[in-house]
Image: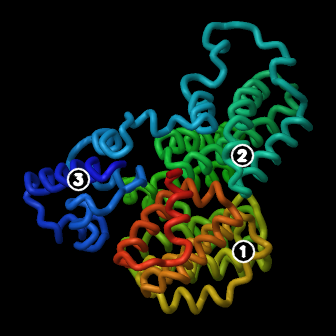
Amino acid sequence: MSRSSDASFGARVKELRTRAGLSQQNLAATLKRSVSWVSQVERGEHEITSVLVLQQLAAALGVPAGEFVAMVLGEGEEDVRDRPYVEVLRLALAGHPVPEALVGEPMPSKAAGGDRASLEAETARAWVALHASAYQQLGPLLAKLIPRLERATRTLAAEDRQRAFELLADVYQVASAMLMKVGDQGAGWIAADRAIGTGERCGDRHLALAGQYRMAHTLAGTDERVLALHVLRQAVRGASAVQQSDDPGLISLVGACALLLAVLEAREGDRKSAEGHLRIARSLARRLGEDRDDYGTEFGPTNVALHAVAVAVELGNASDAIALAGKVQIDALSSERQARFLVDVARAHAQRRELAAAVKALEQAESIAPEEVRELGLVRALVGDLEHFAGGRRVPGLKPLRQRLTHN
């Protein structure tokens, strides 16, 4: 966005804020930003490149998000999503997954597009791509795999049909996770809902619970955090009974829900609840006894340690977060989780105004999972904050990092 466009956008924000009877302090509190951040936006001195931040700002001021997206990016909201690897997946989720079934067209067994072994291999590939944050590869893969599996659930022999349902629920979870990462919470919600429904269709409570976990993730990045908290609290309600279980999948799913719940409660400023759910997750991880990846959760002692850092950051305890981060060994985790952890480390350093250390952590995250870092609106907002804190001072690596993230 040009400097003149920045000024026009800032003037519009100020106009809407004044019309709504809000002070800069009121708006800053709603957005959980500093008053200086709001002031810089209104003066056209701070560029917002995150669609999520624009959506939050629009909600706070009572206008459609599309208006702000159009002003900032010079495009309609749909154009923001116009990344081929995202759009192809959105199209695969649109409408009925097997349209020929609606009009009674026959579906011969070959319409499944492959046997059980090939479908299992492709589903495994999808999980690997997700954990590697390889979204440009993953989107087209899922777009082809979803209709193949939907047809397989209708055409394979009875002995293989149950497995097709399980794989389909898995694939919808992967789709939900990817869409959440690239900022399309609406389509991510659809995929999560289908994961829950597919899990129920095949009678597997684990798959239904995994779908709930993905749905909470999609809701957490929107203004529907209350719904996310509700979904997660439902999932964690039976944690005491799960602690006596020998089922690693169930332990992992409930533990992962407890971790996400702890982060969201910390984000809401509820320290007591956040620390309580972190303790529940830690207890479940001890019960599990190792790091695993059941249902794509990567749950275990290491993931609990990562989330303890995230909770400390959300609560504003930067010193605690950095101290905890120094004790975490992340090498065995996926590149996706490693990068997300390093983003939290960068956030902690930013809270302490340790700008060079924050940039270094972001550069490390980018080297591990470049697509993950580019897609996170949180990172773009953080880089904007770092530039604000720098106040015109040169911070090694900061300007090139912003240019890479905003494609300028």
Q: Secondary structure at mark 2?
A: helix
Residue 10: give x, y in percent of width and height: 22, 54
Residue 140: give x, y in percent of width and height: 70, 35
Q: Secondary structure at mark 3?
A: helix
Going 78% across and 79% down the picture, which residue do you hit? 289
Going 78% across and 75% down the picture, which residue do you hit? 331
Q: Which residue is mark 2?
A: 170
> Is there CB contact under 8 Å for labels 2 and 3?
no
Amino acid type at image mark 2: Asp
Q: Which mark's residue is nearer the viewer, 3 or 1?
A: 3
- The residue nearer to you, when weighing 251 against 343, is 343
Amino acid type at image mark 1: Gly
Q: Which residue is mark 3?
A: 7
Going 42% across and 54% down the picture, which residue do you hit? 50
Q: Secondary structure at mark 1?
A: loop
**Which corner quadrant of the image does residue 120 belong to?**
top right
Q: How crowded is the residue under tag 3: few (<14 C-alpha within 10 Å), some, or many (20+)? A: many
> How has the structure been colored for display?
rainbow
Going 77% across and 13% down the picture, which residue do you hit? 107
Q: Earlier in the sequence, mark 3 or mark 1?
A: 3
